């Protein structure tokens, strides 16, 4: 056994080896130690190797999936070595080969590698997340990317420049990446594969053969780099599936111009699919997703990861959202219908990959029938937008298949195929007969029990069944003698502690009838299963299209649902470089505040070519970051075809979105944080265009005051004058306000705050003009810094400010004007005075109840908190 094990171990490479022994997968040596630690299961020993006991652990085959899931999540790859012959076959082989049968070992082989990027099992996948495998290769200075979600077969080919690879991978979010073995430019955790598998000719040939076409032209115009990557991807799938390929749909070409560009840093800082702390909670998708199907959530994630740039395509999505927004009752009905639909794409993936269960066939039957029902229902709806018609066309055409599956399968087929019972009665007369035969025999056995009780006079005699003996007659030990008599007609089989077991000729005959019929019935069901799988495989593309159409409809209805929930609006998409957002809100922060019973203050943002850079000052915690991000998120949502959290929004199409956060917020990162900040900022200056939208949050904070101010100054100037794109720039450097003197399209704004008797009141409200002061000490007090320390700081500050007055401050050399002299606001009235003024000025009769409520909230916020 050891020789066989070690050969397989060698074959498994860096994967853990699951070695099948009966009802267990066993792991040995280092594999056992690693797995036992990750799975928290007992590590034992077995036998010896080189004089040492062999470490061993095992997992039961029937629950192997949950263990696999944990190993994969921990970053392992697992090779599954199955028994590829039965013990009887092994014995027959031994006889042929002349080996003594005591030495014979059941043949085993690795049938599959389980890796993070090649999963199809429901239990191993997250329903709401795509699971993407990526192959990369570089060809003449350009990188080919082949991406495939093996669970649904969707395959996308694209190409990019080496410096854009990081952004592309951040968009795709792969679970596993494979690259040629001698290529050093891939991501750190990439898996190396033989260079020869990344050949464009072979890639093209494999694709043509897979899809039975003479040329790939019908699918798109693929470059050699793309085809080479596709070759590497398919060869890897071959390798992990040991020749068994999963579902692969025709490749789709993605063009670089197709979408709004966002780099890795932008995605991370906007927390699109994951929050900084990891996970959906606190992310954009967490706050937006109201999909009722896993496939819908996966498509929404794709939409948000790759917002569009094509005006018509965005409008098409928005029109579909609008359609459902206007029809709340139908929307609710639709969502009820969708909720009941199984994950068609993934069921299809399993069936085509040869890992389908009868239950998967049932899911396809139910899902496709429901899709056709939705088609009939929605085809009658008036005023359908074009995208809905496109989708409707893909929901239908499965009549013959659903009819076949409907007749062939029992209502709820089992997940296990090995016990049969999933083909419906009446589908196959031969199968019905076999079942009738074994049914007859079972009834005969039941009758036999009664007869034997009569004949023997043993009322407790039972006919029972188990896996080892098959059918047998059992009586209590004290009655056994009667059946032991040579002429009793019973033959002894087994003596237990309290019972004795017998056989009889008639029982044997009936049992044989059951076994034979059962075996034939199983074989018949298997044959039907294979035939149904073949039918489904033949229809794979249209089934996948139906699954995709259902997902698109789910996403649109979910976006409508979300919009209705919080009164989001349909954005207007424009071709210019303006951005006008009225009453904008941050979906994540708003939801978090709502949970705490607090209200979010909506703010406007109006950028245009002649007022394209807003410099935003104001105290810490005043809402600057939130404002910056909410506007970026609104642009992103709009171009993803979603409604947006605002009362009105007009978005001039953004080609690239950049978001940068000053390094001080990112202390957790390893590299010099300031270095990171500057590398990321440099990328903006290199890549942004006039159509881009940039948000810069406290850039320059990661270094000394002078450096930081100088850099922030220079970056703001460059964004304003060289790139001339829309930009929101939050900063605590007052000195930057002086940029307004030279930059004609830059305007000053601040988040409002009040200090009242030493307490700080943050209004989270954006206003025009520069921030009057930093409120740093008030923020410190708010944060719980002891009064004595704050008092001391105040004294220090007064000294510093006196010096600044005298010298002109740190930006004194930048111009002749004294700092802010022209910009310093009027002395402020106290909050109470202001309140009184506003109350006096309010025209109560002209207010709607909603406005009145808003005013009340506003006033309440404006009031200083009670003194402690
Ligand atoms: P800054 O960037 O100015 O330091 P943040 O944007 O991080 O401030 O906001 C600090 C906190 O203030 C947020 O966590 C949120 O709770 C609250 N906040 C921000 N904006 C608003 C708003 N518009 N309405 C209500 N609360 C807000």
Image (cartoon, rainbow, N blue to C red):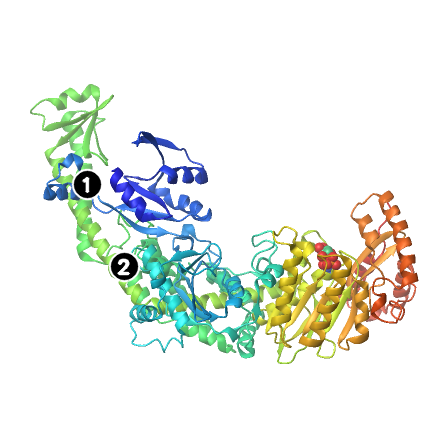
SS for dot 1: helix
Q: Is residue 835 depicted above or below 385 in this figure?
A: above
Locate the N terminus by quadrant. top left
The circle drawn on residue 408 is 2
List x then y, in percent, for residue 459: 21, 26
Left or right of residue 242, residue 437 in this image = left
Q: Quadrant of residue 270?
A: bottom right
Mark 1 lies within 8 Å of ligand 1 (Cβ measured): no
Q: Residue at horizontal 71%, vertical 76%? A: 721
Query: In this view of the protein, which residue sits in the foreground, 59 or 195?
Result: 195
* Ligand 1 positioned in quadrant: bottom right
Q: Secondary structure at mark 2?
A: helix
Q: Quadrant of residue 467 in the image?
A: top left
Above-or-below relation of 637 to 782 = below
Q: Which callout, 2 or 1, points to the residue nearer the camera?
A: 1
Q: Residue furthest left?
A: 487
Give the mark nearest the N terminus, 2 or 1.
1
Q: Which image quarter holds the C terminus?
A: top right
707 or 516, which lies in front? Answer: 707
Q: Depth check: give the residue in front, 700 or 786.
A: 700
Under 8 Å from ligand 1: the CB of mark 2? Answer: no
The circle on residue 87 is 1
**Residue 287 position in % (x across, y down):** 60, 59
Residue for point 76% across, 63% down: 709
Q: Look at the numbered discs 2 and 1 and tell me whether their residues touch, using CB distance below 8 Å.
A: no
Front in this rendered view, residue 138 or 396: 138
98 lies left or right of 467: left
């Amino acid at each position: 056994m050891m020789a066989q094990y070690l050969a397989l171990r060698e074959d498994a490479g860096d994967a853990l080896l699951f070695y099948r022994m009966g009802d267990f997968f066993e792991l040995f040596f280092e594999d056992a130690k690693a797995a036992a630690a990750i799975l928290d299961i007992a590590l034992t020993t077995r036998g010896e190797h080189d004089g040492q006991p062999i470490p061993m652990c095992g997992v039961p085959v029937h629950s192997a999936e949950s263990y696999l899931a944990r190993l994969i999540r921990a970053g392992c790859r697992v090779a599954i070595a199955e028994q590829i012959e039965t013990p009887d076959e092994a014995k027959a082989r031994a006889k042929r080969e002349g080996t003594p049968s005591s030495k014979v070992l059941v043949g085993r082989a690795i049938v599959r590698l389980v890796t993070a990027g090649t999963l199809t099992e429901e239990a191993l996948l997250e329903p709401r997340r795509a699971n993407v495998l990526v192959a990369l290769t570089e060809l003449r200075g350009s990188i080919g990317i082949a991406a495939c979600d093996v669970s649904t077969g969707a395959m996308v080919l694209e190409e990019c420049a080496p410096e854009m690879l990081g952004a592309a991978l951040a968009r795709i979010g792969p679970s596993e990446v494979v690259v040629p073995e001698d290529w050093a430019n891939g991501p750190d955790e990439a898996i190396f594969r033989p260079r020869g598998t990344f050949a464009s000719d072979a890639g093209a040939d494999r694709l043509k053969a897979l899809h039975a076409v003479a040329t790939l032209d019908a699918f798109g115009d693929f470059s050699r780099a793309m085809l080479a990557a596709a070759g590497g991807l398919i060869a890897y799938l071959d390798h992990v599936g040991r020749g068994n390929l999963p579902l692969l749909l025709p490749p789709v070409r993605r063009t670089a111009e197709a979408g709004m560009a966002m780099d890795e840093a932008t995605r991370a800082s906007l927390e699109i699919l994951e929050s900084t702390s990891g996970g959906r909670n606190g992310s954009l998708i967490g706050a937006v997703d109201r999909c009722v199907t896993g496939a819908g959530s996966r498509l929404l994630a794709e939409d948000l990861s790759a917002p569009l740039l094509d005006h018509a395509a965005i409008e098409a999505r928005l029109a579909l959202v609008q359609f459902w927004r206007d029809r709340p009752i139908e929307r609710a009905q639709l969502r009820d219908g969708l909720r009941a639909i199984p994950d068609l794409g993934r069921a299809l993936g399993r069936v085509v990959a040869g890992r389908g269960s009868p239950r998967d066939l049932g899911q396809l039957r139910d899902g496709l029938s429901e899709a056709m029902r939705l088609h009939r229902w929605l085809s009658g709806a008036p005023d359908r937008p074009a995208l809905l018609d496109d989708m409707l066309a893909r929901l239908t055409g499965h009549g013959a298949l659903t009819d076949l599956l409907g007749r062939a399968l029992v209502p709820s087929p089992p997940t296990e195929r090995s016990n049969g019972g999933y083909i419906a009665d009446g589908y196959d007369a031969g199968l019905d007969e076999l079942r009738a035969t074994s049914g007859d025999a079972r009834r005969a056995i039941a009758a036999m029990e009664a007869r034997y009780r009569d004949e023997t006079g043993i009322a407790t005699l039972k006919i029972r069944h188990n896996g080892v003996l098959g059918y047998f007659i059992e009586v209590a030990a004290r009655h056994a003698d009667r059946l032991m008599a040579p002429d009793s007609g019973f033959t002894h089989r087994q003596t237990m502690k309290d019972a004795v077991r017998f056989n009889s000729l008639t029982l044997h005959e009936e049992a044989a009838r059951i076994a034979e019929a059962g075996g034939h019935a199983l074989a018949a069901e298997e044959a039907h299963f294979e035939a149904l799988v073949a039918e489904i495989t033949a229809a794979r593309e249209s089934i996948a299209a139906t699954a995709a159409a259902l997902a698109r409809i789910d996403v649109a209805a979910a976006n409508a649902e979300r919009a209705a929930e919080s009164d989001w609006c349909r954005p207007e998409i424009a071709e210019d470089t303006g951005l006008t957002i009225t009453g904008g809100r941050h979906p994540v922060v708003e939801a978090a505040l709502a949970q705490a019973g607090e209200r979010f203050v909506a703010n406007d943002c109006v950028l245009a070519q002649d007022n394209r850079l807003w410099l935003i000052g104001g105290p810490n915690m005043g809402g600057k970051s939130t404002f910056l991000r909410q506007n970026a998120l609104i642009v992103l949502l709009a171009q993803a075809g979603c409604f947006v959290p605002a009362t009105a929004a007009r978005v001039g199409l953004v080609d690239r979105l950049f978001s940068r956060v000053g390094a001080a917020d990112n202390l957790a990162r390893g590299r010099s944080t300031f270095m990171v900040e500057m590398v990321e900022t440099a990328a903006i200056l290199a890549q942004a265009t006039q159509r881009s939208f940039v948000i810069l949050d406290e850039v320059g904070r990661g270094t000394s005051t002078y450096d930081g101010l100088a850099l922030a100054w220079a970056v703001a100037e460059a964004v304003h004058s060289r790139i001339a794109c829309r930009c929101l720039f939050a900063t605590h450097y007052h000195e930057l306000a002086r940029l307004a003197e030279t930059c004609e399209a830059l305007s000053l704004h601040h988040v409002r705050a009040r200090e009242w008797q030493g307490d700080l009141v943050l209004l989270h409200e954006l206003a025009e003009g520069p921030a009057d002061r930093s409120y740093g000490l008030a923020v410190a007090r708010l944060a719980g810094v002891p009064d004595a320390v704050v008092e001391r700081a105040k004294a220090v500050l007064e000294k510093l400010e006196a010096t600044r007055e005298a010298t002109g401050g740190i930006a004194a050399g930048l111009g002749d004007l004294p700092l802010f002299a022209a910009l310093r606001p009027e002395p402020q009235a106290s909050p109470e005075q202001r309140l009184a003024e506003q109350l006096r000025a309010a025209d109560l009769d002209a207010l709607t109840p909603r406005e009145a409520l808003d005013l009340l909230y506003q006033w309440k916020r404006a009031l200083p908190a009670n003194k402690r």
